[in-house]
Amino acid sequence: MGRLDGKVAVITGGARGMGKSHVRHFVSEGARVVFGDVRDDQGAAVAAGLDGQSCRYVHHDVTSEADWAAAVGTAMDAFGRIDVLVNNAGVLQFARIADMSLADFRRILEVNAVGCWLGMRAVIGPMTAAGGGSIVNISSIDGFTGAAGLSAYSASKFAVRGLTKVAAQELGQFGIRVNSVHPGGVVTSMLFEAAGSSDHADGGSFLQAMPISRFARPVEISRLVAYLASDESSFSTGSEFIADGGLLAGPGY
C-alpha cells in the first residue's frame, strides 16, 4: 500500500473490467483518481463504492477532444495536478476482413488508437507543469501478433505500441515517461462479449498454448500498471511490458 501516495491519475474506460480494477487498485495505493467512461451508470456505481475524497467520475468519450478537456479540467480543479495517465479505454470486435464494415473498422481505430493519442496530447501541459509524470498505454498481445478476426483490434494495438515509443522520445525532455502494457486473455466482460459473438476464438487452444494456462484476473494487470505509474519504474520509458501467462514465449500461439 502507498505506492502511489500523492499522485493524481486520470484513467479511461474505468466503469468495468480492467479499467474498474485499475481505478480501485490506484485508490488503494494512495492515488487520487479521475476516471471516465461512456457507461455512466456503471461508472457512477464504481465511484460510489470508493472514497469521494479520492475519486471523481466523469462522462468521457475518448474520441472527443471536448471530453478530454473536461476530464483534464476536472482533475486540475479537484486535485491541482496530473501525474499519471492510464489510456485503458478500448473496444474489441471479432470479424474477418471480408465480413467487417468500414464503419466498424474505423470505430475501433478511433477508440483504441486515436483516443490514446488524444489523451497523451491532453496531459502534456499539466504533466510538464507538475515536473513530469507517467503515461501507461494499454495495448495487447495483439499489438505483437495477428489473429484471424482481429484486423481492426490488432491494427489499433500495434498503433498504440508505436505511439508509445514516439511519445517516449518526444516527452522524455519534460520528465514524462511513456510505456505500454500488453495483456493476454483477461477475465473481463468485454472479452467474453466479443468471444460470445465469434466463431473464430478457440479458448481451449488459447489456454493450452500458455505456460500459465489460465486467464488473468484484472488486478494482476492493475499491479503492473501501478508499478509503471509509480516512481519505482523511474528508468523505464518507451518499453513494452507483457503480461500474458507466457503465451508469446512459445510457438503455440
Image (spheres, grey):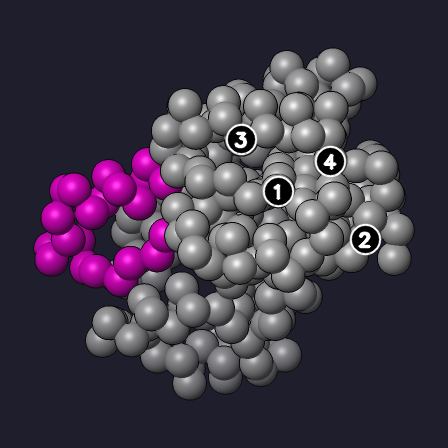
Proximity of marks 2 and 3: CB atoms separated by less than 8 Å? no
Query: In terms of sequence position, does the residue under pointer 4 or pointer 2 come before the other?
Result: 4
Which residue sits at x=37%, y=33%? 63
Q: Nearer the viewer, residue 226 or 184?
A: 226
Q: Position of residue 88 (x, y in %)?
A: 53, 47
Give me the C-alpha separation between circle 2 and circle 3.
21 Å
Q: Amino acid at mark 2?
A: Glu
Which range is magenta?
A: 90-111
Other residues around mark 1 within 10 Å, as few (<14) / some (14–19) / many (≥20): many
Give me the C-alpha separation between circle 3 and circle 1.
10 Å
Query: In terms of sequence position, does the residue under pointer 4 or pointer 3 come before the other?
Result: 4
Q: Which mark is residue 71?
A: 3
Which residue sits at x=73%, y=24%? 80
Q: Amino acid at mark 4?
A: Val
Query: In terms of sequence position, does the residue under pointer 2 or pointer 1 come before the other?
Result: 2
Proximity of marks 3 and 1: CB atoms separated by less than 8 Å? no
Q: Tell me, yes or no, if residue 209 can be seen here.
A: yes
Q: Amino acid at mark 3?
A: Ala
Which residue sits at x=26%, y=42%? 107
- Tell us which disc is closer to us: 1 or 4: 1
Give me the C-alpha separation between circle 4 and circle 2.
11 Å
Q: Amino acid at mark 1?
A: Arg
Q: The N terminus lies in which quarter of the figure? A: bottom right
Q: Position of residue 190 (x, y in %)?
A: 40, 64
Give me the C-alpha separation between circle 2 and circle 1.
16 Å
Mark 4 sits on what residue?
Answer: 8
Proximity of marks 1 and 4: CB atoms separated by less than 8 Å? no
Mark 2 sits on what residue?
Answer: 29
Mark 1 sits on what residue?
Answer: 56
Query: In terms of sequence position, does the residue under pointer 2 or pointer 3 come before the other?
Result: 2
Proximity of marks 4 and 2: CB atoms separated by less than 8 Å? no
